[in-house]
Amino acid sequence: MGRTVIVGAGAIGLATAFELTRRGEEVVVLDRKEPGWASSSGNAGWITPSISTPLPAPGLVATSMKWMLRSDSPLYIQPRLDPRFAAWLARFWRHCSPRAFYAGTEAMSALNDRTMPLFDEWQEHGVEFEMHEKGLLFLGLSREPVERFAASMTYLEQFGYESPKVLNRAELLDIEPHLGPLVTNGFHVKEERHVRPETLTTGLVNRLKAEGVEIRSGVNVTGAETWSGKIAGVQTDSGSIAADKVMIAAGAWSGRVAQRFGVHLPIEAGKGYSITIDNPKHKLSHPLDLIEARAAITPFDNSLRLAGTMELSGLNLRIRHERVEAIRRAGDRYLGDWRGGEEKVWVGMRPLTPDGLPVIGEVPGREGLYVAGGHQMLGITMAPATGELMAELIATGKSRIDLSPFNPGRFTRSFRRSSRRAAAMAS
């Protein structure tokens, strides 16, 4: 049995800890704040393999140009003199191609192949959390964007999904009666689910503690302990912790943590906002994807959460109130008279890679150091599958799927050159 230190107690870190514990491994989880405090605490909570695609997508460059300097738009890019961010953004835009998008979608589909069964297994193994199996309802204010979105999802047939059928307003109201008067069309992906993310992280923490797993809050990791070139633990502001293996799962802070281990990870922070309303005026049954607004509405037990926007302004938790108001206006357009009840505004940082794929695996050249991060808006969806794969890799050195698309070394020139040589030799 080995000992693994996991840096980061969000959904990904806790999921990996849980899966390692199930395999009899000893685990210590560290976080600079409380478990689940960051992106895992206030997001929409969707479990959506059907829209698990890379963030850089065909057509996004043109859309970005229209939105990027408007501070209340779905995508806002704050101008800043930062050469590293400029390089990251240029690489991101280069990945907005059909070839990169579909290759990435195929890789993420393989990663998601056990997502739903794993959520069920977690509950069977005593992880308690709020989960709903109502599907996901996509809504539009006119037919054209709905048809375009539905047509873009026909590729999902190869992954076992039915092609979406566009519904009219009357059909939508049969499914969700409290839609606003401006909603005209939509479609329903019935296979999807949603959780209240705070309950998921709390449930994992409770289960891990019941298994005797040590979870330390308020710990800052400052570097690595090594022995003969191999990872032997971590250095923290409160002393060293020995370990056979270390995994970085610090969300949007993973790039900063990786630097302390001498590793380059181009993970950029994508800020998102949400508004949670307790005891809302209307009780919805289904989570809603607001197509034109690029926003989400999720119903939980006795509350409603409106979430959305993507803000690239660096790693910070400052709230821009014009972006919160944009989410409120989206609620007005799609739900009509929805306001009322006590509101709580939240901001969180999503971890973004320039190619839109997570970083999952052992760091090349750094034996014993692993990374699981960069899941953009899909951290909740992919947490169980990522945790299972990382636990398998850490415990056995093997993986049931090909992890090469997610390799942490793919951003270095030497790794890309060696990959091209290997591909040429294989062909």
Image: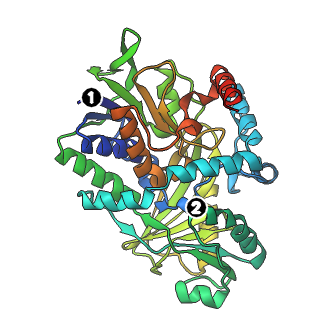
Give residue 92's position: percent from left, percent from top: 71, 40
Identity of the residue furthest to the top in this view: 228
Mark 2 residue element: helix
Asked if residue 226 lies left or right of residue 171, the reply is left
Residue tagged 2: 159
Q: What residue type is labelled 1?
A: Arg
First in sequence, mark 1 or 2: give its number: 1
Q: Are marks 1 and 2 in contact (CB under 8 Å)?
A: no
Give residue 349's position: percent from left, percent from top: 53, 45
Quarter of the picture containing the N terminus is top left
Work out whether 160 lies above or below 79. Answer: below
| Picture quadrant where residue 350 is located | top right
Mark 1 residue element: strand
Residue tagged 1: 3
Asked if residue 259 lies left or right of residue 427, the reply is left
Q: Nearer the viewer, mark 1 or mark 2?
A: 2
Residue shown at the point (79%, 48%) measured from the top left:
61
Q: What residue type is labelled 2?
A: Phe
Q: How many labels does the image show?
A: 2
Give residue 269's position: percent from left, percent from top: 58, 40
Residue shown at the point (47%, 27%) measured from the top left:
257
Q: Is residue 365 visible in the rendered structure shown here? A: yes
In the drawing, what numbered circle is on residue 171? none
Q: Is residue 8 visible in the rendered structure shown here? A: no
Asked if residue 97 lies left or right of residue 236, the reply is right
